Structure formats: structure tokens, C-alpha cells
Amino acid sequence: MQIGSKCYMEVNLRNLKRNLVELKKFQKKIIPVVKSNGYGLGVKEVARALSDETDFLAVGNIEEAHAIADAGIKKEILILNPLLPKEYNDAIKRGFIFPLESKKDLRELFRKSRNRKKPRIHLEIDTGMGRSGVPYGDAVKFIKDVVGIRNINFMGIYTHLSAPDMDSGFTKEQIAKFLNVLSNFDFSNFPLIHAASSAGFISYKELMRKPFNTSRIGLLIYGIMPETNHMTINVKLNDVVKVKAVILRVQEVKKGTTIGYGITFKAPQRMKIATVATGYSWGLFRKLTNKGKVLVKGKRARIIGSVCMDLTVIDVTGIPGVKPGDEVVLIGKQGRERIDINEVAKIVGTIPYEILTNFGNALEKKYIFK
């Protein structure tokens, strides 16, 4: 994480909580996903802000589970990614809910376990993601084996949709496979049956009806709308994240002046330019070179020349009164203008998750509660 107040992320924790409250209007039980250090916003701060509105928090690994539990946040912690066998005993001792994927995992679980406490297990069924979970063809038999073990607390079952935002045919096929597995069992008493992430949540109403009883939501809680081809519900979100920097230098340059590494920009005319305290080490993608926009005094200013490690130049020609120390908004609203994370993701050629975590894990945070 970069140290310094000249470029930082402002995180509105009150709006974060408001977004969770809004989502619960559509489905009563929501599992906030706070993995990857709370999408870069700070796992402990995010978990604490959401804790009044949920019974469960989902993390990526056991380290994040420990961070939340050690912070005194007394919520059920769901670990989404596979654990190493050496981590089983610790997870059982702390009461974390974690996945198993095979009979080999099951054998290792009991070989490693030195606790009297029952392991709390949830199962991911791989219906087409291909990265983790019990393979679809093996799922029914494996679940029968696990459910029959008395000294395991079987907490639930889920799948992960590969392309709910872009491929409805494949998504419906995944949902059908998952429901087919469920049809072999009585899961009515299980607390967690889920398939929807943010994109699935806004795109497929069937994922909010029985047998599903919850959804894993990340991006929406952080105030960002997934782009999808078939939105079915209208969610009103509050802004959670704003990325800010400051202007260090303002100057006028003549026609033909070159800007930045690689000589990627030459002034086509006399211009006023400003040097901003941000760059790729602060989370600003280098692919925004000569393409990205920022906000200065409520107006859009184009990035010119290469995004450097900790400095970036912008064109402020036609924006009066710009001076060193002025605020620059990289993500968020200033005046009537807005730089949206989805807009930046399109320019870079990536997804909003990467933009958010890139900035979040690079920058210091200033938390606000209003």
C-alpha cells in the first residue's frame, strides 16, 4: 500500500450499509462477500460496518476469516476458497464454515482434526466454473457420503455461475444442473443454498426463490452495478468509493511539447497542463495513457502522455483557476460530473472488480460515516 495523503481512497461505510439494506428488500438473507481484503476497502472495516445487517460474512481464505474473528466481529464466517489440509484443524477450532471437494479431503479432514468440535462444511458444486468444487457428475454420490456422517455439521450447498452477465443459455444450464443435484435430497433445513453473485442477483429472479435462500453479494454492496444483458430488478445504489488525488504543478506549454515516457503525446497547440500526484503504483492503470479522464473543478480533463509510476499529466486547457493543491477525482462524483468504475473498466479492457481492488489495495483509506 502506498503511503501518503496526496492520492487516497475515500470509503463511505454508511452508504455501504445502506446498499446492503436496499438489497435485502429483494431477498431477506444476503451474504456480503468481503474477500480480497473487502474488495480492497479493508476487510475489518467493511465487515464491521455490515455486521448489524447480516448473520454471515463470506471471505476468500482462512487468513481473512481470522482477521474478522480476531477483530471481535461475532458473525458466521464462510470461507469460499479451498483450504489446505493443514488449515482444517484451525478452521474447525474457530468454527469457520469451509468447503470440501473430494473423499480425499474428507479423509484428510478426520486425519488432521484434533478437536471435539464438529467441522462445519458447505459444498460447492462445479456446474461449469471449472476452478473449484465437487464435479457435477460426482456431486450426488459425494453429498450422500457427507450427509451420512454424524460428526459433520453440513451447513449448505452452492454453485458459482460463470457468465450470468453475458451468457443466459449457459447460466440457465448451470442453474438446471444445480437444481438437479438438489432434487436428490431434502435441503429444506439447510441455512445456506445459493448460486447468485451480484450479476446473477440482478439478472435471474429464480435465484431468489426456493430452494435458494440466500445470495453472495459483493460488487452491488460496494455501490457498483454489474453490466448485464438482462437486468430483471432495479436496485438503487449509494456511492461507496471515491478516489482522489491532488495537483502538484500547473504550466502552459507550447505546440510540439512532448509529454511523458515514450513520447506518446505531443501538444497539438498551446495548452495548459497539470501534473497530478497519482500513477500506476497508486492503482491507476497504465492503459489509461492518452485515453482516461479525471475530474477537476467539476469538469472532465483528459490524461495526456503515459501514466507514470507516481505522476500523471492531464489537459486542463479551458478549465479556469486550476492551481497546485486542487482536488482531482479519479473515481466518483465532483460537481455534476462523474467518473464511473464501469467507464474506466471499459477503457482499460477489464472488469470493475479489477479496477476497484487495484485502487483499493494500492491506496490508503479515509473512512467516512455520513
Image: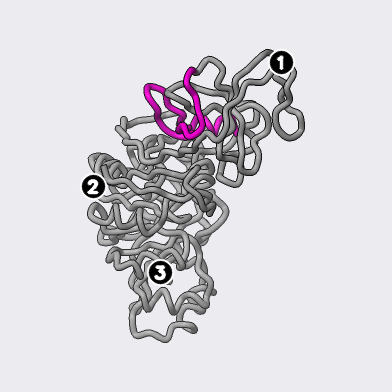
Magenta stretch in the rendered image = 320-348
What x and y, as percent, mark residue 81? 49, 61
Q: Amino acid at mark 3?
A: His
Label 2 sits on residue: 28
The residue at the point 38 percent across, 84 percent down is 115
Position of residue 334 relative to residue 181, above or below, is above
Position of residue 214 relative to residue 73, above or below, is above
Report the mark closest to the observer, 2 or 1: 1
Q: Based on the displayed image, in which of its 4 quarters is residue 99 positioned?
A: bottom left
The residue at the point 29 percent across, 64 percent down is 73
Q: Secondary structure at mark 2?
A: loop
Q: CA distance from mark 2 to mark 1?
A: 60 Å
Q: Which of disc 3 and disc 2 is earlier in sequence?
A: 2
Label 3 sits on residue: 66
How packed mark 3 is, by other alpha carbons closer than 10 Å (few <14, some 14-19, many 20 or more), is some
Is there any visible trace of residue 298 in the rendered image? yes
Magenta run includes residue 343: yes
Q: Based on the displayed image, in which of its 4 quarters is residue 64 positioned?
A: bottom left
* Nearer to me, 146 or 8: 8
Q: Secondary structure at mark 3?
A: helix
Q: Amino acid at mark 1?
A: Lys
Q: CA distance from mark 2 to mark 3?
A: 27 Å
Q: Which of disc 1 and disc 2 is earlier in sequence?
A: 2
